[in-house]
Image (cartoon, coloured by chain):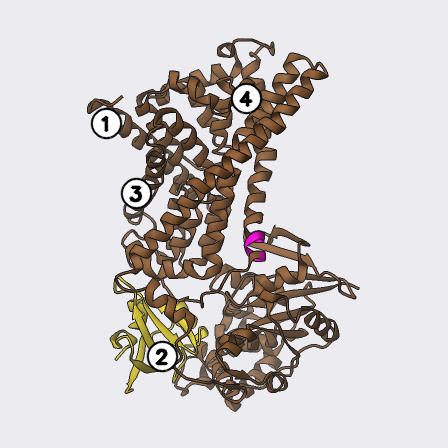
């Protein structure tokens, strides 16, 4: 399961990140490390990108980037 | 002795506000060597010792994927920076502390300015500042930058700390720590520190670039790192950041007491409407409409009328009277009134509208709406080969193309960035507005607003079509991404707004006083003298008429193959508003500009038809941007080839569009 599959309002925990790339480094530096909780807040009006809450702030990323982040869903 | 401090922090943490509070009007803006990233410095007011502050770009990390990060990293490590002042947003502690830990590893004396304590209070969260300070081993000063609180205390702390280097903090796991120690000893670079060792773990051989070294031993060390870290569940580029965040999570849990976990903030409430699925796009359109209606509608035009009265009647009129009263010769009178003041005056008249536009754009930027607009528009812009982040440069392009091109730096992807820079000049900048204003008044007096508005729309349409067309030719670069923070909405402070707007207006004024003034004088000389340098009374015998007549045939198919119009377009390359000032000089209205500012209208009506006027406006909108924008584009693209391709493309498109408008219009019976 990846972050892409999490619906607005749901929470999940990061289990792994995609292949080695500058993008992955950026994602980690923004605080999306293993074990971090992410809440999906909403989709943009046209369905992409998405807005998430992580470490107390709001971040937007595209579905494509979200699909690189492996997660486990947390039941509310 | 003077102290140099480097102001470093995340974007949106209030860094610029703090900089403005520290330095007041004592600022000077320049560029970092070799790049056009703005470098702002200033002297701290009322300090016991001389302190120079340098405001670094807002960054999330000291890594090297964006130009801003590279510049910041180089500066904080350079011998120039004595003390690092790290501004930390208390309401966003965890992510801000990541940069703090990286900065601490540089080892320089360091002070933390903890901002947004008021936001924390309003959320009823509690932060134990003393405990955090003890944990990090650094002085922390609580400030509210927007209200100027805590600034004196911060300055005192900087002076106290200036000779105390920051010791290395062993926050890593034993395995990583022993590797750092080993690397520090064995890394054969000039000054090997723990910071270099950590970079070597993260970046491998590329971390030793720029240091004299023994390549063979570096390769061996690199293999050792791979070997030592083998078996950990992460790659080496992730481990350091991951362990930093582990430490931050632990510290934050100790020092921060949160009142609720899932609070609904003011930003959430605003976003519930502003980025709402159905409302977002209509609201976005409405905001854009309001920006333009404020700048160019009743408010802007009232200010403009008052300002034109001030310039034309009070200033130029009185100078004219004065010149006559002291009996200057007629050529000197003409040079000053028609050449210099007429040219500059016709451009300055638009200052109020441009200032209001700049103010509105600053308001959108400072409030946090710009990133929402990027979020809303990303999907649409991607269809045109762009990114949501391209949106910010494009909107700024309505103000001035130069800062807009610079703003494209926030795009990390080379391809997105290049494409954004190629189409941003199609956004109609403030300098092009005077041209539309004059022509709309002369030929479309009943529909002025619609005609002017249509130019802005035309620019956007051409930009979009160009995106679709060009994306096939612009080479694919690094993977595009849209990792972007959506900062909390903030009420922009008046001080910041004024400073921000003033900086941009100042640029416009300087241009009017220098480039436009010189251009006006040159045009005046060329239009009043012939090639034998004899002053002539009939400007159709002048040097400029000769040149204008030579190039006019290019524009004949577009409906304005007239030498004065052609020459105005050439001079417009110096600055687009010069199209109007040149016409002012060439059509000889400078003489009457004092009593009748709209006097260009009569002469224009004799040369243009409404159709050719419209084609002329479209050409002015689309053809290559002014010299300043051209130079910026060259520096930002760092490629002559792409810069020349871009301006040729723009001029070609301008000719084609004007051709279609004029010939198409003739075909359907317009004139």
Q: Is residue B200 visible?
A: no
Q: Disc 3 sits on a residue from what chain?
A: B
* Part of the protein shown in magenta: B495-499
Q: Is residue B284 visible?
A: yes
Which of the two discs, 1 and 4, labels the residue nearer the N terminus?
A: 4
- The brown-tinted chain is B
Which of the two discs, 3 and 4, labels the residue nearer the N terminus?
A: 3
The image shows residue B218 at horizontal and vertical percentages of 54, 74
Find out whether residue B284 is within the magenta segment: no
Helix, strand or loop at label 1? It is helix
How far apart marks 2 and 1 lie (CA) works out to: 56 Å
Image: B342 above or below A60: above
How far apart marks 4 and 2 lie (CA) works out to: 66 Å
Helix, strand or loop at label 4? It is loop
Kindly identify which residue carries mark 1. Answer: B664
Check chain identity for marks 3 and 4: say if they share one.
yes
Kindly identify which numbered label has been placed on residue A38. 2
Evaluate if marks 4 and 2 touch, with contact meaning CB atoms under 8 Å apart. no
Image: B50 above or below B236: above
Kindly identify which residue carries mark 4. Answer: B595
- The yellow-tinted chain is A
User: In which quadrant of the rendered view does residue A26 lie?
Assistant: bottom left
The image shows residue B561 at horizontal and vertical percentages of 37, 19
């Amino acid at each position: 399961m990846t972050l892409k599959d999490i619906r607005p309002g749901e929470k999940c925990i990061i289990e792994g990140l995609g292949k080695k790339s500058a993008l992955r480094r950026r994602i980690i530096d923004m605080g999306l490390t293993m074990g971090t909780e992410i809440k999906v807040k909403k989709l943009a009006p046209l369905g992409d990108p998405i807005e998430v809450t992580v470490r107390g702030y709001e971040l937007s990323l595209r579905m494509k980037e979200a699909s690189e982040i492996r997660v486990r869903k947390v039941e509310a | 002795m003077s102290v140099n401090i480097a102001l470093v922090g995340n974007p949106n943490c209030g860094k610029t506000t703090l900089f403005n509070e520290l330095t007041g009007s004592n600022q000077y803006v320049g560029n970092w060597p070799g790049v056009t990233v703005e470098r702002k410095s200033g002297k701290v007011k009322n300090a016991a010792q001389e302190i120079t502050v340098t405001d670094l770009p807002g960054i999330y990390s000291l890594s090297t994927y964006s130009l801003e990060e590279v510049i910041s990293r180089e500066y904080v490590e350079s011998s120039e920076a004595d003390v690092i002042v790290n501004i930390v947003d208390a309401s966003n502690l965890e992510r801000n502390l990541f940069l703090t830990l990286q900065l601490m590893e540089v080892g320089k004396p360091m002070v933390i300015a903890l901002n947004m304590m008021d936001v924390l209070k309003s959320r009823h969260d509690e932060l134990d500042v003393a405990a955090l300070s003890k944990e990090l081993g650094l002085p922390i000063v609580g400030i509210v930058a927007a209200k100027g609180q805590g600034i004196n205390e911060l300055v005192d702390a900087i002076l106290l700390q200036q000779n105390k280097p920051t010791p290395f903090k062993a926050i890593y796991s034993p395995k990583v720590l022993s590797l750092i120690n080993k690397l520090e000893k064995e890394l054969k670079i000039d000054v090997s520190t723990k910071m270099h060792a950590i970079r070597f773990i993260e970046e491998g051989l590329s971390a030793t670039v720029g240091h004299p070294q023994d390549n063979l031993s570096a390769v061996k060390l690199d293999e050792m790192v791979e070997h030592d870290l083998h078996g950990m569940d992460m790659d080496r580029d992730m481990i350091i950041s991951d362990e930093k965040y582990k430490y931050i999570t632990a510290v934050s849990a100790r020092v921060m007491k949160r009142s609720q976990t899932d609070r609904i903030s003011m930003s959430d409430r605003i976003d519930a409407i502003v980025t709402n699925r159905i409302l977002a796009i209509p609201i976005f359109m409405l905001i854009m409409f309001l920006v333009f209606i404020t700048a160019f509608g009743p408010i802007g035009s009232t200010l403009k009328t008052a300002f034109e009265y001030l310039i034309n009647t009070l200033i130029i009129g009185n100078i004219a009277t004065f010149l006559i009263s002291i009996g200057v010769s007629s050529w000197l009178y003409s040079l000053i009134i028609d050449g210099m003041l007429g040219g500059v005056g016709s451009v300055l008249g638009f200052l109020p509208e441009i200032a209001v536009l700049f103010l509105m754009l600053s308001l959108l930027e400072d409030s946090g709406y710009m990133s929402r607009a990027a979020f809303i528009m990303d999907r649409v812009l991607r269809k045109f080969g762009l990114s949501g982040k391209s949106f910010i440069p494009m909107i700024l392009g309505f103000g001035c193309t130069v800062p807009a091109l610079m703003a494209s730096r926030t795009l990390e992807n080379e391809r997105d960035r290049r494409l954004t820079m190629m189409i941003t000049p199609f956004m109609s900048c403030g300098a092009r507005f005077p041209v539309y204003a004059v022509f709309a008044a002369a030929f479309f007096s009943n529909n002025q607003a619609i005609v002017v508005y249509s130019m802005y729309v035309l620019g956007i349409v051409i930009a979009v079509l160009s995106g679709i067309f060009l994306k096939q030719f612009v080479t694919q670069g690094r993977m595009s991404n849209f990792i972007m923070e959506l900062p909390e909405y903030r009420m922009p402070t008046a001080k910041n707004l004024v400073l921000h707007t003033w900086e941009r207006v100042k640029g416009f004024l300087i241009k009017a006083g220098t480039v436009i003034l010189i251009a006006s004088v040159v045009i005046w000389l060329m239009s009043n003298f012939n090639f034998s340098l004899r002053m002539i009374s009939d400007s159709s015998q002048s040097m400029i008429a000769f040149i204008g007549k030579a190039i006019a045939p290019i524009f004949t198919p577009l409906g304005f193959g007239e030498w004065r119009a052609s020459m105005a377009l050439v001079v417009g390359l110096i600055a687009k508003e010069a199209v109007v000032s040149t016409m002012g000089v060439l059509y000889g209205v400078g003489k009457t500009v004092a009593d009748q500012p709209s006097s260009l209208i009569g002469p224009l009506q004799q040369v243009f038809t409404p159709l050719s006027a419209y084609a002329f406006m479209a050409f002015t909108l689309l053809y290559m941007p002014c010299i300043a924008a051209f130079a910026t584009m060259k520096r930002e693209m760092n490629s002559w080839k792409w810069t020349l391709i871009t301006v040729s493309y723009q001029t070609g498109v301008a000719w084609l569009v004007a051709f279609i408008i004029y010939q198409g219009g003739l075909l359907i019976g317009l004139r």
